[in-house]
Amino acid sequence: MPRLQRTHIEAYVFRRRSGRVEFLCLRRARDRSLGGVWQPVTGKSRVRETALAGAVREVREETGLSPRRWWALETITAYYDPAKDVVLMLPLFAAEAGAREAVQLSEEHDAHRWLPARAAGRLYLWRRSASASRPCAGRCSAAATSRARSRSRPSPPTRAAARSRSGDHDDRRRHGAVAAPEGGATMAGTSSFDVTTGVDFMEVHNAVDQATKEITQRYDFKGVKATLELSQKDKKITLAAPDEFKLKAMWDVLQGKLVRRGVPLKNLKPGTVEPPPWAAPAR
Amino acid sequence: MGSARQVIEIQDGLTSDMAREIVKTLKEAKLRKVQAAIQGDTVRVSSASKDELQGVIALLKQQDYGVELKFGNFRSN
């Protein structure tokens, strides 16, 4: 008797861009099983992990995306694997990614494309994947329609919804929207961005290394004990040299390296120079 | 042997003063429909209108807060 396995999940990540719904297709890397095959995000949920949590994790691991809106699709996929004599049942999820979010692939895949439902369906290997993206296309264009209701002209997703309405579209409308398990609450129809500041510590590290190398090789620093130290924890760079002129030269070198590595100098605040003890005023 | 020392501080993330300053700028600019919320070392700016948000970026780029501002995590729902 075949075993029943319920560990796997599939997530159809889509985005809305200029009025079109596009699905994320991933190509499996050549050195993996089924290399070259196009697929949606797939994976296994772990022990004591809900299918949704597993889907969220897999999407993050395989694409670097963290969609805020998730839907559990009404259907599940079931198929039989004769090699293992296992019947697999997969919950399906749809997730909406931001229109401009960049995909970062894991080692598992070597290419990705954003495609309209129909083209994505043609690319996916399995028919079940092709059919699975269709209801979520209907579902999300329904969501798009309700939001775009105020617009006078029907936008492309509305027309797509009209096409898919030939089937049991109204049933699909009832797909339960699942609250995203993480991420902040957002209002519908709003856009947002974050303002922050900061430096890429990797680049600062490189710049400090390069500056150190240059200084140790410089003629005027021959036999001089001069050090640059980066402490990422304290967010500080400490320069040490026998005198203030050397210190100034080091800071100049470091600035040059930082600029070339794209680190904003504005974010670096040089403190006051502590003179060496022998230069301190005699008491 | 002693040596001269200089400590360079790296500003990573907005200080709460900078964040407040940014929110203040936005409030004074009287941009309608724009909300700004301080979230730790970032300020999240949201609005129903993307044009307004573009205006916010242009406005903030003109200001000087003593650090290089980064704009990111663009999302639209």
Image (cartoon, coloured by chain):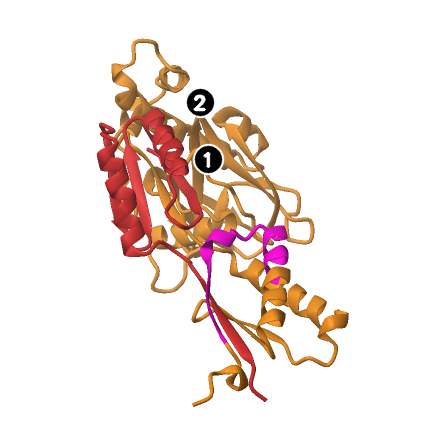
**Same chain? Circles 1 and 2:** yes
On residue A131, which mark appears? none
Q: Which one is earlier in the sequence, the residue at label 1 or at label 2?
A: 2
**What's the distance in space between the residues labelled 1 and 2, CA to CA?**
11 Å
Q: Is residue A192 left or right of residue A106?
A: left
Q: Is residue A113 left or right of residue B33?
A: right
Indicate yes or no whether the magenta region holds residue A74: no
Secondary structure beneath dot 1 equals loop
Q: Which residue is mark 2?
A: A18
Name above or below for residue B65 compared with residue A276: above
Q: Are marks 1 and 2 in contact (CB under 8 Å)?
A: no
Indicate yes or no whether the magenta region holds residue A262: yes
Query: Any idea which chain is the orange one in this picture?
Result: A
What x and y, as percent, mark residue A2?
A: 47, 56
The kind of residue on which mark 1 rests is Arg
For the point 22% across and 36% down, which residue is it?
Answer: B27
Name above or below for residue A21 compared with residue B41: above
> Pointer 2 indicates a residue of which chain?
A
For the point 41% across and 37% down, which residue is it?
Answer: B61
Q: Which residue is mark 1?
A: A100
Q: Which residues are magenta?
A: A254-274
- From this viewpoint, is residue A88 visible? no
Depth check, front residue: A255 or A146: A255
- Residue placed furthest toward the top: A153
Snapshot quadrant of residue A255:
bottom right
The colour applied to the residues of chain B in this rendering is red
Snapshot quadrant of residue A142:
top left
